[in-house]
Amino acid sequence: MKVIITKDNIEGGTKAFEIIKKGMGNGAKVLGLATGSSPIPMYDDMCDSDLDFSNMTSINLDEYYGLNPDNDQSYHYFMQKHLFDKKPFKNSYIPNGMAKDIDEEVDRYNEIIADNPIDIQILGIGRNGHIAFNEPGTPFGSLTHKVNLTESTIKANSRFFDNEDEVPRQAICMGIKSIMQSKKIVLLAFGESKQDAIKALVEGPVTEEVPASILQDHPDVTIICDEEAAAKLSDKYRK
């Protein structure tokens, strides 16, 4: 596990973009993508670059269940706004939050991931160590699955909605086993609120109570965090 500490999220986004650029130069064809505030600077760099993504495939981690893709809080909308409108991909896969049969959609998405092995997976991390909507207690062997969102996640995400009642209670989410099958993983974390999560991810025990801790067992993981998020790490990571 490699830890890169940056002065802020802008520099962190540039570091992540450089990894993607290098990976594409070495033949990477499939990117696993994340939503949330952490990857936005990286997406800005991707959009401002001269890189051509028209032969690339993207697979997103998750989507709210019950939100129309045109809803400005859907992850479809987020990805169009921050990346795909400026840099279209050959194929862009995001779970269908309006699927009539959620179990069929879960099966479909697992097939997509199996047919398109992810070369570089981008992740964020929640305050409680969750990755995507894989909350504490999610089995490490999980594939794409339906998630009942926890009250803490609903409350955290309510800042993006007019009120907490509008936050969907379910989501479709790539499983931890699926994430771990990615060839390379890059996790982004910025701000004081991520200190405990980063400490647990990097130096804590591997436990399902901290889903991100499983990344310690992956052969190629880079953690990119700013000084605030890295504040509780041991000195050996802060050199």
Image (cartoon, rainbow, N blue to C red):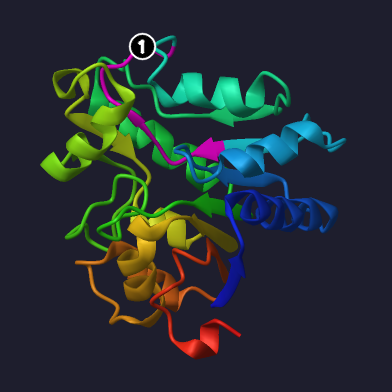
Q: Residues within 10 Å of mark 1 (few under 14, many from 20)?
A: some
Magenta residue span: 59-69
Residue closest to the far bottom:
236
Q: Position of residue 96 (x, y in %)?
A: 38, 22
Q: Position of residue 227 (x, y in %)?
A: 52, 67
Q: Is residue 199 above or below residue 140?
A: below
Is residue 213 shown left or right of residue 55? left
Q: Is residue 212 above or below residue 115?
A: below
Between 195 and 183, the one nearer to me in the picture: 195
Element class at badge 1: loop
Q: Quadrant of the C terminus?
A: bottom right
Task: Identify the residue under disc 1.
Answer: 68
Q: Residue at x 25, y 16 (%)?
A: 162
Q: Is residue 81 above or below residue 234?
A: above
The question of residue 63 being in magenta is answered with yes
Residue closest to the far right:
50
Kindly indicate the quadrant of the structure image that contains residue 50: top right
Q: Position of residue 214 (x, y in %)?
A: 36, 71
Q: Quadrant of the N terminus?
A: bottom right
Q: Residue at x 39, y 21 (%)?
A: 74
Is residue 178 shown left or right of residue 67? right
Q: Is residue 208 above or below residue 103?
A: below
Q: Residue at x 72, y 58 (%)?
A: 19
Between 120 and 233, the one nearer to me in the picture: 233
Q: Residue at x 54, y 27 (%)?
A: 79
Between 232 and 100, the one nearer to me in the picture: 232
Residue kind at label 1, given as amino acid type = Asn
**From where the camera sits, is residue 56 visible?**
no
